[in-house]
Amino acid sequence: MKPPKTLRSRFGQVYERVFKTDGDRRRAESVLEERQKRIEKLDIRPLSVEDRRRFQEAWTRDQALFVDDPQGAVAQADRLIGDVMKARGYPVGDFEQRAADISVDHPMVVENYRIAHDIAIRDRRGEVGTEDLRKAMVHYRALFDELLETRAAAAKEGRR
């Protein structure tokens, strides 16, 4: 069992969220350790150069769509995140499981996913305006970049 400080430093806000939900540090640590074990069993893989380019082009089209159809763009961004996750080998079941799975490899941006998804849900009920939809796109973009590993890929290809 990893020491609590290691889990806390590895998961950051995710650790605090799980602790707040469960109210017990040992239970929170157990939940996070189970997440790690689950992810270790999965075949999570980087995207091919071709897939990365295809998804990046799709994101660019989606951003352009935002000008004329912010609601459609947010819905498309949510679907695109799911498509990228699936291509990388993440299971794409219910939202909570997707967020839990992402939290293992991308703990610094999973909160972006939660915020964006919440805005998308509230949008379906007609409860948000264009500024909220813009924020959702920003949050989706942070996760999208992480899932595409654009910085790591650029470094690997010799670019900055």
Image (tube, rainbow, N blue to C red):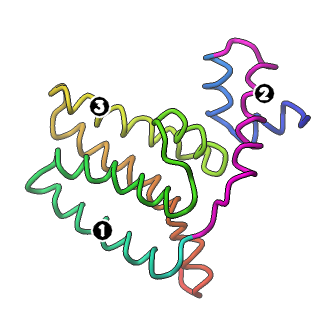
* Quadrant assignment, res 120: top left
- Crowding around mark 3 (Cα neighbors within 10 Å: few <14, some 14 to 19, many 20+) is some
**Residue drawn at x 17%, y 55% as measured from the top left:** 66
State how far apart marks 3 and 2 are (Cα): 29 Å
Q: Which mark is residue 29?
A: 2
Say whether disc 3 or disc 2 marks the residue closer to the N-terminus: 2
Residue furthest out toward the left: 68
Q: Which residue is mark 3?
A: 121
Task: Inspect the magenta stretch and tell me whether residue 53 lies in it.
Answer: no
Q: Amino acid at mark 2?
A: Glu
Q: Secondary structure at mark 1?
A: helix
Give the image location of residue 111, x and y in percent. Answer: 50, 38
Q: Quadrant of the N terminus?
A: top right
- Crowding around mark 2 (Cα neighbors within 10 Å: few <14, some 14 to 19, many 20+) is many
Q: Which residues are magenta?
A: 22-46
Q: Amino acid at mark 3?
A: Ile
Say whether disc 1 or disc 3 marks the residue closer to the N-terminus: 1
Q: Secondary structure at mark 2?
A: helix
Q: Secondary structure at mark 3?
A: helix
- Crowding around mark 1 (Cα neighbors within 10 Å: few <14, some 14 to 19, many 20+) is some
Q: Which residue is mark 1?
A: 58
